Amino acid sequence: GKLPGAGAPGSGPECDISSRSFRRPMISFKMCMVGSYAVGKTSLVDRFVRSIYSDKYHTTIGVKIDKKQVSTASGDASCLIWDIAGEDEFYTVRNSYLRGMAGYFMVLDATRRVSLDTAIGIQERIKITFPNVPFILLLNKVDLVGEQEIDMSDLGYFDERRCRIVQTSAKTGEGVEQAFESLVTSMVARRAG
């Protein structure tokens, strides 16, 4: 006997393409979060992916990966967000974690000047191995107004290189959606050629 629903090729509801919407295909991207330790990389990802913020500090060991779909005017993207452990005097970001990335965020803590020096060092290394990968500099924790040690005028190294700079706060959400959507737009445009 015949299986229920089996018939001529192209028949049956499972093959009815008239009801499908024809959207652009979903593009998958790997994006990385890099920077010094405790600059707020994990908090920025949590704010973007889950719309949450926690005052509790959790050290990332190695890499933590999250996923989120993003729709922009340039197209839809499925983003794998690699939250890479922060760099310090004992740990250096590994190129193996960065391999295959389509874009990245360099994150600074506006309340810790040392995070700027670390970011410049990381950026110098990344640009040697991944010279054409788009990135955005995030000046995070801008909500802590009285505690800031870095402001936009201190970012000459990145400004001279025409880097996009976005001020963010994982706590309030300021600039977070904008930054992620902007990086996705750059990655889609780069892939389109």
Image: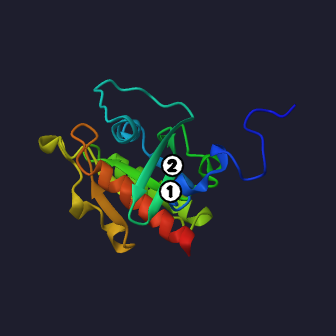
Whether residue 135 is visible, yes or no, is: no
Q: Position of residue 100 (x, y in %)?
A: 63, 55
Residue name at image x 78 percent, y 45 percent: 7
Give the residue furthest to the top: 56
Check disc 1 and give the amino acid type. Answer: Ser
Q: Residues within 10 Å of mark 2 (few under 14, many from 20)?
A: many
Left or right: 178, with 153 as reference point: right
Residue 160 placement: quadrant: bottom left
Residue closer to the observer: 134 or 123: 134
Residue name at image x 62 percent, y 63 percent: 129
Q: Is residue 61 above or below residue 168?
A: above
The label number, if any, that marks residue 79 in the structure image: 2
Residue closer to the observer: 61 or 133: 133
Q: Position of residue 86 (x, y in %)?
A: 47, 40
Left or right: 163, with 65 as reference point: left
Residue contact at pointers 1 and 2, CB within 8 angstroms: no
SS of the residue under disc 1: loop
Give the mark, 1 or 2, whose residue is nearer the N terminus: 1
Q: Position of residue 29 (x, y in %)?
A: 55, 54
Check disc 2 and give the amino acid type. Answer: Cys
SS of the residue under disc 2: strand
Left or right: 71, with 19 as reference point: left
User: What colour-coding does the image apply?
Assistant: rainbow
The label number, if any, that marks residue 21 in the structure image: 1
Give the residue furthest to the left: 146
